[in-house]
Structures are given as structure tokens and as C-alpha cells.
Image: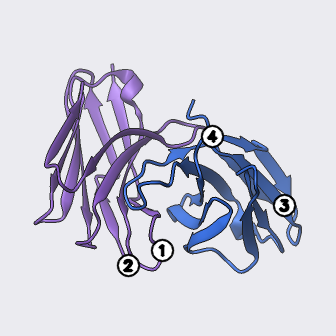
Chain colours: A purple, B blue
Amino acid sequence: GENVEQHPSTLSVQEGDSAVIKCTYSDSASNYFPWYKQELGKGPQLIIDIRSNVGEKKDQRIAVTLNKTAKHFSLHITETQPEDSAVYFCAARSYGGSQGNLIFGKGTKLSVKP
Amino acid sequence: DSGVTQTPKHLITATGQRVTLRCSPRSGDLSVYWYQQSLDQGLQFLIQYYNGEERAKGNILERFSAQQFPDLHSELNLSSLELGDSALYFCASSDGLARNTDTQYFGPGTRLTVL
């Protein structure tokens, strides 16, 4: 089945710097890759997603890139702000025996220092 | 606010007991997913329902079961609870129309503590 690896597990940046989180997946048939932000005590919130027919997608300060050949995708946050501090999860859609479900990475705890 | 609601927010119970978690999907969404989030295992997919029917199963224990009702709300039943079942349980919903690429929206979760 699908396996998603996420790095780093923790990331600390200064306000205004950029942050990059990377994920790799194993199932070459996966075609949907969302990113979620989870703040303390809340459920995961979708911040951006990308489908396999697209190489890059941007939404203001957030961008995601996808390299299907290498089977990895990355989240880029520019001009980070303290409110960006949260745990970020990448995910990939699995086609295995459980089609339709998302396989999540272990998460990256991002801390943005003022 | 994602539009997905879950009750209760917190649940404390004892080993061996049975609990029911409830989820109401976003208006118009036909698919409901259940996930378990624990510190050591991250977010794990449990089960998916689409318009009342089970569509996919993940790492769901036999002690756990779920159903989706005609009004599309869903319940996750956890029985013979063990200490290791303590976790956050999330429900997510999607419209279910784009079978492989539709977006899932998560509820606020239920924190289950088994003592």
C-alpha cells in the first residue's frame, strides 16, 4: 500500500523567512496530494492541494510542487508569520485496498519565532 | 469552520466500556471518513461511508464499527475499550463525486480518554 514519509519532523524559522516541508510517497498511482494545517486542539484544515496533472500550485504565500518521477512533493511557505506556527501534514490518495482514503505523513511541527 | 461537526468534544471512560462518536458532514457531502490520531501513529484512516454504504476500510479494529444513516450523519462505535484506544478521533466529509480526488474537510475531533 501507499506510504508517505515527511521531513523534517520539526522546523523552526524566524518570522519573515521561508519554510519548506518535503514528502515522498511510494504508490506511483496516487494522484491527489493535499496539505493540512493543524492547530492545537483543532482538526486538520486543508490549506492547499495538488493533482498529479499539475507540477506547481500557488495560493498567496503558500505553494506546493510535485515531482511525479521522483515521487515527492513539497510545501513552501514564504514570508512566514507567527500565526503559521502549527503542525503540517502532507497526504497522498491511496488506491490500494482502501481506495478513497488519504495516507498521511507523520507531520511537521513548524514554529515561527517573532 | 469546516462545516463538519462532531460530538462530543471530550469523552472519558473506563476500559471495557463502549462509546459512540457522532459526526455530521458538511451540507451536501455524501462521503464520511473516520480517522484516528494518536501520538505514535499519526493520522490513521479507519473507514469510509458513501451515501449510507461502506466504501473503504482501513486499519479499523474488529471492536470498532461505524454506520451512516439516511440523513448522512455517521456514528463510530468503539467497544471493549482498551487504554491504547485513547486518541483523537476525526471525521471528515467530501462530496464523494470525484471518487479519487475529492477534497476532505475535517471536523474538530473527539478526544477519547480511556482510564
| Three-letter code for the amino acid on which mark 3 is drawn | Val
Q: Amino acid at mark 2?
A: Gly
Quarter of the image for the C terminus of chain B: give it. Answer: bottom right
Q: Which mark is residue A1?
A: 2
Judged by depth in the image, the label closer to the viewer, 1 or 3, is: 1
In percent of width and height, residue A46 lies at 42, 40
Please name the residue that numbered disc 1 is placed on: A98
Q: Is residue B73 left or right of residue B39?
A: right
Q: Secondary structure at mark 4?
A: loop
Q: Look at mark 4 in the image and give the residue it sits on.
A: B4
Sequence-first tag of 4 and 3 = 4
Task: Output the chain of dot 1.
Answer: A
Residue A74, position in %: x, y?
21, 49
Q: Are marks 2 and 1 on the same chain?
A: yes
Q: CA distance from mark 1 to mark 3?
A: 25 Å
Dot 2 and dot 1 residues touching (CB under 8 Å)? yes
Residue B51 shows which numbered tag? none
The secondary element bearing badge 1 is classed as loop
Q: Are marks 2 and 4 on the same chain?
A: no
Q: CA distance from mark 2 to mark 3?
A: 30 Å
Name the secondary structure under disc 3.
strand
Asked where in the image residue A94 lies, by quadrant, the reply is bottom left
Label count reads 4
